[in-house]
Image: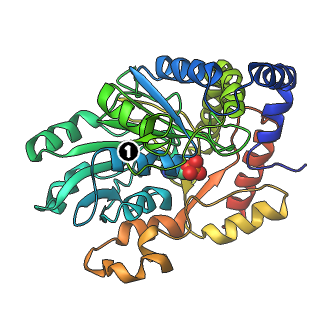
Amino acid sequence: MKVQFSKIKEGWVELNKEVQISLEKTINSGFFIGGKILEDFENKFAKYSRSNYCVGVSSGLDALMLALKALNIGVDDEVIVPSNTYIASWLAISHCNAMPVPVEPNSKTYNMDIKKIENRITKKTKAIMLVYLYGHVVDIEKVLIIAKKYNLKIIIDAAQAHGSKYNKIDIGSHGDIVCWSFYPGKNLGAMGDAGAITTNSNKLAQKISCLRNYGSNVKYYNSFKGFNNRLDTIQAAFLIEKLKKLNKWNKKRKKIAGIYINELKSLDLTLPTEESYCKHSWHLFVIRLRNRDKFQAFLKEKNIQTLIHYPIPPHKQKCYKELNLNKFDLRLTEQISKTIISLPISPHHTEIEIEYVIENIKKSFKRKN
Ligand SMILES: *Cc1c(COP(=O)(O)O)cnc(C)c1O
């Protein structure tokens, strides 16, 4: 048997009929940028994520960058960011000419350790960027207290958390701006690059809507030096159909996560947690263990594809060499990157496939790793 890491293609095959209809609808609408189909998706995603406004943009990275720009973050500003994240969270800050200030994770949730935030706040700090990594939310109420005390903005990177909840509530209006990616492999993935922001602030939604379109609300009148960061109408049409499946598909992810947890709990490895305030979207199922590389090689031999999210933390990347981040002790992040591994999970894996993965994980432990 061969088990892929993620079965993106199978998702679109299931939606084949809907895709054809969306394509025709878009052609017939005559709008390929903007238009009613885009607005329809934005309204539906705002409602789904329980926020007042949604603005579709071209990718997750662009969503983060426009969010920071809309909050006027720029030169000489510092933004607190998790050290344990995908590099896009950092790049967005760098592209605004601001400084990413890393904070180490909590070793249970892998998300930013809230207790370590205040130590990193300086006179230059303007915002805190939180990432809901793997789909596990942050205890946002605690961060809101800190943000209020120091007058900081909060940007949420929810690229991995479509359908996650905090204390049973959808997360679309957390902090000042929530940023989403619809990269094909995400829980809500488009058929190419796509993203969005959600917020309860009319002012910020309008500003981002303007910034994504050359800084212009009225054709040929430019109030900001904006960008071309729009969401294609055709992607919005596809996303409308995917969104209808999201809750059902997230339930399948949850079921697979449950099977893994139940079957692997007696082995000498660290399973993911789901804190009491969190409803997990199970974008990724990440475990931690000794001899990770040998373990991965063993599974590969058995035709089981696994990935590492992420093998090199942002502060260790060549592109961040000049920042001189050595003054920060980021040992936990480095240790995590060497011991984590993500197991296959998606709405389209069969239970037989997951059982095959589990059986081989057990075998690898019998070989004493
Ligand atoms: C995928 C991802 C992004 C970037 O999204 P793109 O649409 O690929 O630009 C940002 N942050 C996190 C945490 C992600 O997982």
Q: Position of residue 321 (x, y in %)?
A: 41, 82
Task: Please give left or right for residue 285 compared with residue 352 in the image.
Answer: left
* Residue 146 visible somewhere in the drawing: yes
Dividing the image into 4 quarters, which one contains the C terminus?
A: bottom right
Residue 349 appears in which quarter of the rendering?
top right
Q: Is residue 331 above or below residue 118?
A: below
* Residue 350 visible somewhere in the drawing: no
**Which residue is drawn at the image coordinates 41% and 24% (left, top)?**
53
Q: Is residue 201 above or below residue 197?
A: above
Q: Position of residue 347 (x, y in %)?
A: 72, 32
**Which residue is drawn at the image coordinates 40% and 28% (left, top)?**
171
Q: Which amino acid, by three-letter code, is at mark 1?
A: Ala
Is the residue marked 1 within 8 Å of ligand 1, measured from its CB?
Answer: no
Q: Position of residue 206 (x, y in %)?
A: 38, 31
**Which residue is drawn at the image coordinates 39% and 65% (left, top)?**
94
Colouring method of the image: rainbow
What is the number of callouts on the image? 1
Residue at which label 1 appears: 67
Q: Position of residue 331 (x, y in %)?
A: 36, 72
Callout 1: helix, strand or loop? Answer: helix
In-front residue for pair 127/264: 127
Farthest-out residue, front? 220
- Bin the neighbour count of mark 1 within 10 Å (Cα to Cα): few under 14, some 14-19, many 20 and up: many
Task: Please give left or right for residue 323 compared with residue 24 in the image.
Answer: left
Task: Please give left or right for residue 116 compared with residue 340 in the image.
Answer: left
In-front residue for pair 106/55: 55
